[in-house]
Every structure is written in C-alpha cells, then in structure tokens.
Amino acid sequence: MVQDPKAAAKRINHWISGETKGLIKDLVKPDMFTDNSRVMLANTVYMKADWDQPFKAESTSPGTFTRRDGSTVAVSFMHQADEHGEVAVGDGWVAGTKPYLDGASEMLIIVPDAGRFTEIEDNLPAVLGDVNGALTQTDYSLSLPPFTATSTTDLREVMESRLGVKGLFGEVGLDGIGDNLYISSAAHGVKVIVDEKGTEAAGATVVGMEATGAVATTNAVVADHPFLYVIRDTKTGAIEFIGRVLDPTATS
C-alpha cells in the first residue's frame, strides 16, 4: 500500500536523473501510485558519443527548414562535405549513416521526400528494411540541423490504443515477481541532443504494477525538412534511440 506517493516518485526520479546525467527528470508522477501499488520497475539507458568525423564549427551556416505545413523557420545547418558512411535512396526517401567515434554505434538519418513524411513514418519498419538493403559505402555530403528532442510517452495509451496490444495491462499473471500482480501503468521518457561534436542521449522507462484484491545511392543527404533518425548498434542493428525532427527549433 502506498503511504507517500510524492516521496516515492521523488526517490525514483532522483535515481533516473542520476543515471541519465540529468537529461530525464520528473518522469514518475505521484498519481502513478495507488493504494494497490506494489512494485515500480525503472530502466534507463544513456549514451554520449562523439562523431567519427565531427562537423567543423566554421562550416555551420544559416539556412531554412520547411515544416510539414509548408511554413519555414530559420535554423543553422551543420555541413560535412566529405562524410564517409552508407547512403541509399528509395521510393520517397533518401538516407545516410553517420558513424560515432567508437565504431559501435551510428546514426541513420532518413529524409522523406517533401509531402511524404507521414507515409514514410507510418511504414517505418518496412522502410528500414528497404534502407538496410540499399545502403552503400560512399563519400557524400551531409547537411543536418543541430537539434534537441525531448518526449514523454504514456506507453499504456500507445500500446493499447495505437498498437492494439491486448492482455498486457490489467491482466494478472506476474507470478514470477509476486502473487496477484498486474501491470497498471508504463511511461517512457527520452532526450536526445545532437550538435557538431556528437550526440548525447538518454531514455528511461518505468512500469508500475498493482495487486488485485489479494512493449540506388545519392551523394547528398540534406535534412532541410522533417526527417527521422535512428541511433543503432553497428554490429547487431539493435535500435538504441529512434525519433523524428519536425522543427529543429522546438525541443519536443
């Protein structure tokens, strides 16, 4: 039984903030606890990696980014004229990879054609397969705006309403953890910072459990309109972070 929801949330948030170097704060809310709360599982991931080829600060220059609604915003663009990585072009998109210095991770940047962002995003799993099948090692030029992306997501709402996941929340069946437990809530927070030097990113997920009564190539990639990014392991392809940039001047 919950005796002090505010203190419990504060303690978990303090741990999450410490593990993510202060990038993620206040993910857990006191109202996530009820009289039936028994367990709160928390998981975090943090990375800070320099680019294999950093952008030169003197190459950063002003430009224009076109939002989905056709409006424009003035932003700075980082430019790399001699980027070496993998590039691919497909039906409605162009993509390129930018490796990190440690060689273990890379950022995959997918730039949908103007007017096709929603279509590409909605079919991202299939698009990722097409991208992976078409990527070719080459030198290319990359123009990318610095950005900071922050988001907090109610995973229960996403998984049940948007993904159609059934039988996960509110269903008793966690006997390996404790008797008569069920998952009542789940939240996920992410913050990604991209600049000339590299990337700093963190993610945190919390799951609340309650008791019952007893988850062809091109030589230029120009991200001057909405784009998607994937930070992934170069050996396994495992996705570490994934997101979209609709407006580089916004933080979410």
Image: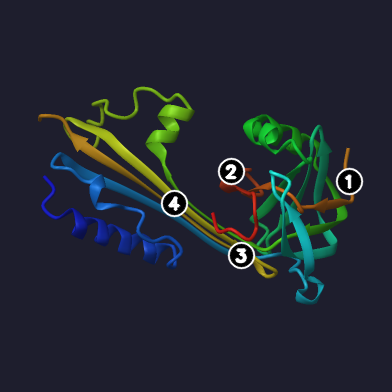
Label number found at residue 189: 4
Scheme by which the image is coloured: rainbow
Residue under pointer 1: 218
Q: CA distance from mark 3 to mark 1?
A: 26 Å
Mark 2 vs mark 1: give the one in front.
1
Mark 2, residue position: 238
Q: Could you tell me which secondary element the residue under label 3 belongs to?
A: strand
Q: Are marks 3 and 4 in contact (CB under 8 Å)?
A: no
The answer for how far apart the CA atoms under marks 4 and 2 are is 19 Å
Identify which residue is drawn at 42% across, 54% down.
44
Q: For this view, does 206 lie left or right of residue 229? A: left
Q: Nearer the viewer, mark 3 or mark 1?
A: 1
Q: Tell me whether the residue at label 2 lies in contact with that at label 3, contact meaning CB atoms closer than 8 angstroms.
A: no
**Mark 4 neighbour class, 10 Å CA radius: few under 14, some 14 to 19, many 20 or more:** many
- Distance between mark 3 and mark 4 Cα atoms: 20 Å
Which of the two discs, 3 and 4, sits closer to the camera?
Answer: 4
